Image (cartoon, rainbow, N blue to C red):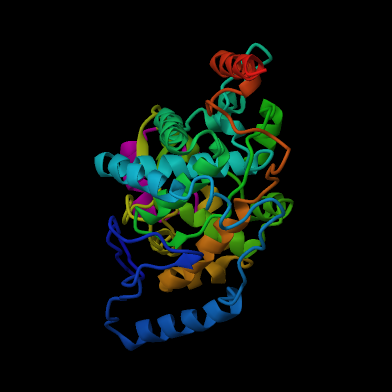
Amino acid sequence: MRHVIADSSPTPWNMPIKRRVSVPQNTQKHKTMASSNSLLLVSSLFLSSFFCVSEAQSSAPVVQGLSWNFYDSSCPKVDDIVRKQLKKVFKADIGQAAGLLRLHFHDCFVQGCDGSVLLEGSASGPSEQDAPPNLSLRAKAFEIINDLRDRVHNKCGRVVSCSDILALAARDSVFLSGGPDYDVPLGRKDGLNFATQNATLANLPPPTSNTTKLLTDLAKKNLDATDVVALSGGHTIGLSHCSSFTGRLYPTQDATMDKTFANDLKTVCPANNTNATVPLDIRTPDIFDNKYYVDLMNRQGLFTSDQDLYTDKRTKEIVKSFAVNQTLFFEQFGKSMIKMGQLSVLTGSKGEIRADCSVRNSDNANYLASVVEDDEESLSEF
């Protein structure tokens, strides 16, 4: 198989937490190019990176109600609690990182980053989790978030929302897989309701989407072409079921897919088996790096929504920029995640801080019992 550029970034298990967007120091060690043609290619692509992706693009402003130091007084160690536990989780199974990152995406794209995807269904109807795009969300990811919530609440009391914990977990999933470290503005409240299945379907672009649909849908969320390409880079880690891309293999092969790559996929995903899984990034499936974009340049993107980013002239040069400049990708990914992580957040008196991430407080019998006990204790003082 053909390769364009290859970088490697070790998993930074012991690197300290830093603020805003920081990039591992060794992410720009490019391999020596053997020919002058290759050097010219790299030079031209580096130049295009400055025109297509503004390195000076400022971080998204913080929306009212969120701040960089929201828990400095009430839970100053929340970042450390989350990261320390996730180091243990990922040491046992690094595959969980992709599951947590995807969970954050699916939360934010549907009625905002309010933790509504964490809510289980009830007698009032099915939850977001029951919508087809969310059926493949990892069950373990939900367990990890609730475990983190327990650890944070045991240390600080019920002051940190589940939606904030999910945002922190997504950030650490990126960093502990080898990607950039970026700050997360905090102060989100948890939503009181989950979206309908129709709303969930309407807000999660399927893997069969072309670039026009992606740009149109995400523009409604104030995400531009650079954000779309950068956030798609989250597919540098994780797995996909065959059912998400076999339409590109059968009955005829997608012309934009490399033939050797297609034949390899067919051995894993025969026409009558859609349950098998393959890595989203064939080069470094468990490392958060820029190889996803190298895949696209080699026509080895798995989804239509991935490969079309390199086919479409509106996004092609951005893909090239990230493929040859990992630092540029890391910086933009952090900025775009900060921007996405503030979509339609609930703050202040809106929403709540759930005692259990999977249940609204009004439906939580244990929570209601504790409230009654607290009220009785208060009355006994008079």
- In the depicted structure, whether residue 319 falls above or below residue 363: below
Q: For this rendering, which residue is in front, 62 or 28?
A: 62
Q: Is residue 268 magenta?
A: yes
Q: Is residue 240 visible?
A: yes
In this view of the protein, can residue 302 be seen by the observer?
no
Residue shown at the point (47%, 50%) measured from the top left = 76
| Residue at image location 29% in from the left, 81% down from the top | 33
Residue 57 placement, left or right of 87: right
Residue 174 image point, x, y percent: 42, 53
The magenta segment? 246-270
Q: Position of residue 92 (x, y in %)?
A: 25, 39
* Image quarter (top left, top right, bottom left or bottom right) of the C terminus: top right
In this view, the residue in front, 69 or 268, is 69
**Residue at the extreme top:** 123
Where 359 sits versus 266, above or below?
above
* Tally of marks: 0
Query: Would you say residue 208 sits in the magenta stretch?
Result: no
Q: Residue 381 or 174: which is nearer the viewer?
A: 381
Where is residue 140 drawn, in percent x and y? Answer: 39, 30
Figure quadrant of the N terminus: bottom left
Q: Does residue 18 appear to the left or right of 357 in the view shown?
A: left
Identify the residue shown where x is 50% and y is 34%.
157
In the rendered image, residue 102, in percent from the top left (x then y), is placed at: 49, 42
* For residue 342, side relative to residue 320 (left or right): right
As drawn, 30 above or below 1: below
